[in-house]
Amino acid sequence: RRSPRSPGLEICLVHRPKYDDWSHPKGKLERGEDPLAGALREVAEETGYAAAPGAELPTVRYLSDGRPKEVRYWAAAATTGAFAPSDEVDRILWLAPDEARAHLTRPLDRPLVDALLATLPPGTGPCP
């Protein structure tokens, strides 16, 4: 989203108390669910905000308890909504890109910030 306090972009990070980590919103697809539809559903469930999808970002692959995981991401702009804490996500933060990159718990999540910035129109930056 565009920052309501200053010119520039803010990225939403979620805090998951189960893992005590800060990450990008993500989750599991429902059976037969389209990946983009699932991503938008998960963003809404975790952040309380509807989102307008943009470019697809790189897929992140990793092992969790010895099992391979694959997470697909999209750039998205927050539209309407408001956050309400839940058992799954108890806090969100809206941060400038450099702050978001530094705040992410897992190093594998950090390149997604750069991938998001690369989707901006040529000649623009995170702080127009």
Image (tube, grey):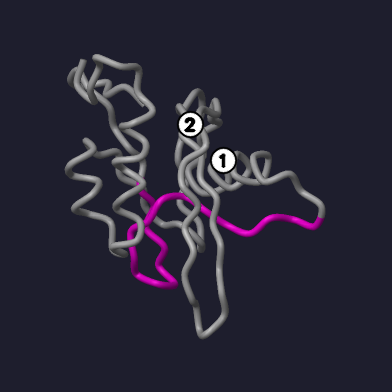
- What residue sits 45% from the left and 27% below the top? 77
Q: Badge 2 is on which residue?
A: 76
Q: Is residue 76 above or below residue 115?
A: above
Q: Which mark is drawn over residue 84?
A: none
Disc 2 marks which amino acid? Ala
Magenta segment: does it hold 23? yes
Q: Badge 1 is on which residue?
A: 44
Magenta-highlighted residues:
13-31
- Residue 60 in percent (x, y) is at 47, 58
- As rendered, which of 44 and 86 lies closer to the eye? 44
- Residue 101 in percent (x, y) is at 23, 49
Magenta segment: does it hold 11? no
| Element marked by disc 2 | strand
Q: Is residue 115 above or below residue 33?
A: above
| Element marked by disc 1 | helix
- As rendered, which of 39 and 92 lies closer to the eye? 39
Q: Earlier in the sequence, mark 2 or mark 1?
A: 1
- Residue 58 in percent (x, y) is at 46, 47
The quadrant the N terminus occupies is top left
Residue reaching furthest front?
A: 122
